[in-house]
Amino acid sequence: MPGIRLSSPTLNCPNALELAAFYAEITGGRIAYSDHVWATMDGPGGRIDFQSDPAHVPPTWPEPTVPIQFHLDFYVDDLDTAASQVLAAGATKYSHQPNADHCLVFADPAGHPFCLSTWDMLNR
């Protein structure tokens, strides 16, 4: 529909600036804005906003008690190298990996799942 454009996804988390710094580190992005409640990370491929929410409860994937509701996917050239980089930055790798041949699932420091993938559906 004309006049409506996607700005960016926003993730609730315990500390907006800390999570923005995590994603800036793993993507080579930068923190474009921050205050006591909000932070914006601008990186290759777009931006992500973060909102501090002291009541944030991380998802319990793959167990469904607290559903994911949202996750981020990142394309990578080398899965093993990218996995090492996100782990060094503070991510946690899930033991359940349903597509480990081309996609690995991690949790960011606030517990949000995200995927690193070598499979680009649109550019196959």
Image (spheres, rainbow, N blue to C red):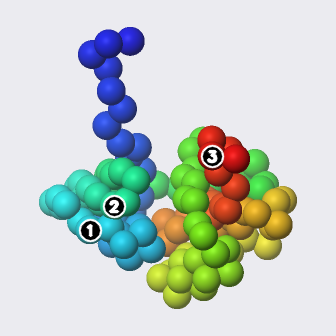
Task: Look at the numbered disc 3 and give the secondary structure of its residue.
Answer: helix
Residue 16 located left or right of residue 66: left
Query: Which image quadrant is residue 43 in?
Result: bottom left
Residue 49 is at least partly visible in this image: yes
Q: Is residue 112 visible?
A: no
Q: Which mark is residue 43?
A: 2
Cα gap from disc 3 to disc 1, whole angstroms: 27 Å
Left or right of 17? Residue 12 is right
Mark 3 and 2 residues: CB-CB less than 8 Å, in contact?
A: no
SS at badge 1: strand
Identify the residue under disc 1.
30
Q: CA distance from mark 1 to mark 2?
A: 6 Å
Disc with the residue nearer the chain's start (1 vs 2): 1
Q: Are marks 1 and 2 in contact (CB under 8 Å)?
A: yes
Residue drawn where x is 70% and y is 55% of the image: 119
Q: Gap between marks 3 and 2, in whole Å? A: 21 Å
Q: Quadrant of residue 94?
A: bottom right
Residue wearing tag 3? 123
Q: In the image, what residue type sits under mark 2?
A: Gly
Residue 1 x/y as whole percent: 38, 12
Residue 15, image x and y in percent? 34, 65
First in sequence, mark 3 or 2: give its number. 2
Q: Residues within 10 Å of mark 1 (few under 14, many from 20)?
A: some
Residue that appears at 17% across and 59% down: 33
Within the image, what quadrant is residue 97 found in? bottom right
Closer mark to the observer between disc 3 and disc 2? 3
Query: Few, some or many C-alpha atoms within 10 Å of disc 3 (few <14, some 14-19, many ≥20)?
Result: few
Among the two numbered marks 3 and 1 on one chain, the one whose residue lies closer to the N terminus: 1
Tag on residue 78? none
Q: Where residue 5 sits in the image (x, y, percent)?
A: 33, 27
At x 71%, y 67%, the residue is 104
Amino acid beneath label 3? Asn
